[in-house]
Image (cartoon, helix red, strand yellow):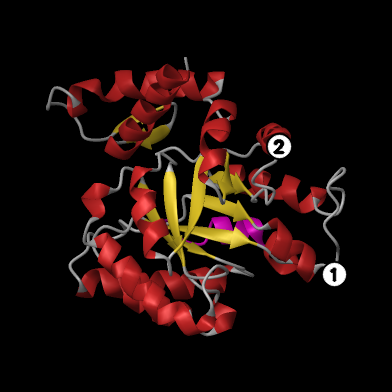
Amino acid sequence: MMFRSLIFVPSNSKRFIEKAKALNADIICFDLEDSVPLNEKDIARQMITDALTKRKEYKSNIYIRINSLESGLAFSDLNAIIHEGIDGVVIPKVNDEDEVNKVEQLISTLENQRGICEDSIKLMPSIETAKGVVNAYPIAKSVQRINALVFGVFDFLYDMHLDYIEDDGIEYVYARSKIPVDARAAGLAALDGVWQKVDDIDGFKKDANIAKRLGYSGKTIIHPNQIEPIHKIFIPSKNEIEWAKKVLEALRDSIEMGFGKGAVKLEGKMIDAVHYKQAKAILNTLYESK
């Protein structure tokens, strides 16, 4: 899968949930956290459950952002929303690997109880605190389900007792730079934080280009008008294209022809059908961007 765009969709709004079916973001993330008031959490959980029964109507990967473990709501969220059709969970405000392990253990239990394929639901820890930034690499390496880290800039600034100043981002430049390095060291993607001024597309593009130069694979976004610009900016790199071509060549016999090994070694690493799918997505994205 691609990690260029993850759009947060308030899950207490039936209208927004329905409109998400037409969005071409790489990931649709139904939000149970910041955009949902406390008295509407139960309604939002039910709306997500209803949406998952119509999973085939959504073109994108479906993730859910639960509430943080510190909120005391995370396990209630997971019990409500872990069903067939969910592709992943975003965990906000992760401070250390122990928090990820607790979430992973409950998801494993629910997968087993509800007949969901083991380890099929992925995890994205969101790094939004000073402690989380310090522990970003151990968090990234904590469980195999993790496929990306997310940087939550505004909660990070709040935790640091700093104001957001748009000029140069010096207040968060260390954290913003460290997270994609830690993610890459763990073999993961990284998604940059949101750009709040939805009408300022030029500012958004400038911010996204900085994120790309720092090593992010894409950005989290909050408005559909940010999808097309972000996809044009985060086109596959030369290295990604070369890797994708090698993967397709190495797995063509087993995946397309139906014979040969299901997993093979490429440049010292084992690759299989998941890598084949990712490689196809990279090359399709390159074709679509032309």
Q: Position of residue 100 (x, y in %)?
A: 51, 68
Q: Residue at x 47, y 50 (%)?
A: 147
Nearest the camera: 265 or 212? 212
Is 167 placed above or below 44 here? above
Q: Position of residue 221 (x, y in %)?
A: 57, 48
Residue 122 shows in this picture: no
Q: Mark number for residue 201?
A: none
Q: Residue furthest top?
A: 290
Residue that badge 1 annotates:
161
Nearest the camera: 156 or 225? 225
Structural crowding at the residue carrying mark 1, measured as other residues with C-alpha within 10 Å and reported as few (<14), some (14–19) or many (≥20) = few
Is 285 placed above or below 122 here? above
Q: Residue at x 57, y 66 (%)?
A: 92
Q: Residue 95 falls in which quadrant of the image?
A: bottom right
Please state which of the two labelled residues, at mark 2 or mark 1, is closer to the viewer.
1
Residue type at tag 1? His
Q: Secondary structure at mark 2?
A: helix
Residue 141 shows in this picture: yes
Q: Position of residue 75 (x, y in %)?
A: 42, 80
Q: Which sits earlier in the primary sequence, circle 2 or circle 1? A: 1
Q: Mark number for residue 214?
A: 2
User: On the rendered image, what quadrant is the N terminus found in?
Assistant: top left
Is 137 a magenta residue?
yes
Structural crowding at the residue carrying mark 2, measured as other residues with C-alpha within 10 Å and reported as few (<14), some (14–19) or many (≥20) = some
Q: Residue at x 32, y 31 (%)?
A: 276
Is 199 left, or right, of 21 in this rendering? right
Magenta stretch in the rendered image? 135-144
Is 191 left, or right, of 24 in this rendering? right
Q: Secondary structure at mark 1?
A: loop
